Amino acid sequence: MEITKANFLCSNTDWKKCPKPNLPEYAFIGRSNVGKSSLINTLTNHKKLAKTSGKPGKTQLINHFIINDSFYLADLPGYGYAKVSKKLREEFQKFTLNYLEKRTNLICLFLLIDLRVKPQKIDTEFMEYCATKEIPFTICFTKSDKLKKAEISTNLENYKSYLLKEWESFPNYFTTSSVNKLGIDEILSFIKEYNLAFKS
Ligand code: GTP
Ligand code: MG
């Protein structure tokens, strides 16, 4: 799928104020600094569509983008960032979870995980939350450009064995990089397929 048009629509904390849920939507979540906004920029081939930063905690609202006039991408605030106050963190959490639970056109939540980092409880807890609430998610392992090929395989295997201790099967996943574009075509094909299914 070629992205010919990508526009920022709005920022919100209230899911009720998000764009009319008449188009399929894909949202990006994960720990602060994992690369959510960067992945949106790489997918849409726009350097500055979503605001990125070297410092964690950049995205603090639910940001909607409309792509090819036919689907939405939503950039969400990161979780698990210790340097914002507890109150603020809880606030983020409340409106983000509300959005995830209420957004009727949310086709898939891309859950980003830094492939360089050993499995973190906060991510697996979040996966459990998604499973309980029946929120469909797909893992995107990020920053794979920082790893050698062999390290990519080892880290993937480690992640799988970690998760399969508790889970019956491993969730659908992509290995990605916003730098060398690994996995980008695969995610775009995935979105295209689900967009077609949404239409019918
Ligand atoms: P918050 O909005 O703070 O939750 O962060 P985020 O998840 O949106 O991360 P963001 O896209 O702002 O990226 C954080 C940092 O990671 C930036 O310095 C990016 O340049 C870097 N980064 C993101 N993706 C990649 C990647 O695939 N490879 C490498 N090497 N760096 C990346
Ligand atoms: Mg961000």
Image (spheres, helix red, strand yellow):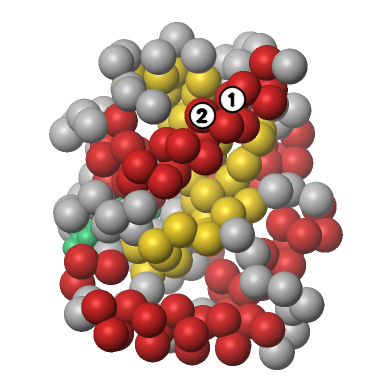
Q: Nearer the viewer, residue 195 or 6?
A: 195
User: Residue 121 sits in which quadrant?
Assistant: bottom right
Q: Residue at x 52, y 40 (%)?
A: 190
Q: Residue at x 57, y 73 (%)?
A: 122
For badge 2, the amino acid type reads Lys
x%, y% of residue 61? 46, 37
Quarter of the image where the N terminus is located: top left
Left/right placement of residue 138 relative to residue 178 reads: right
x%, y% of residue 109? 59, 46
Q: Nearer the viewer, residue 116 or 78?
A: 116
Q: Nearer the viewer, residue 168 or 65?
A: 168
x%, y% of residue 56? 30, 59
For badge 1, the amino acid type reads Asn
Q: Which residue is mark 1?
A: 195
Q: Residue at x 62, y 42 (%)?
A: 108
Q: Residues within 10 Å of mark 2 (few under 14, many from 20)?
A: some
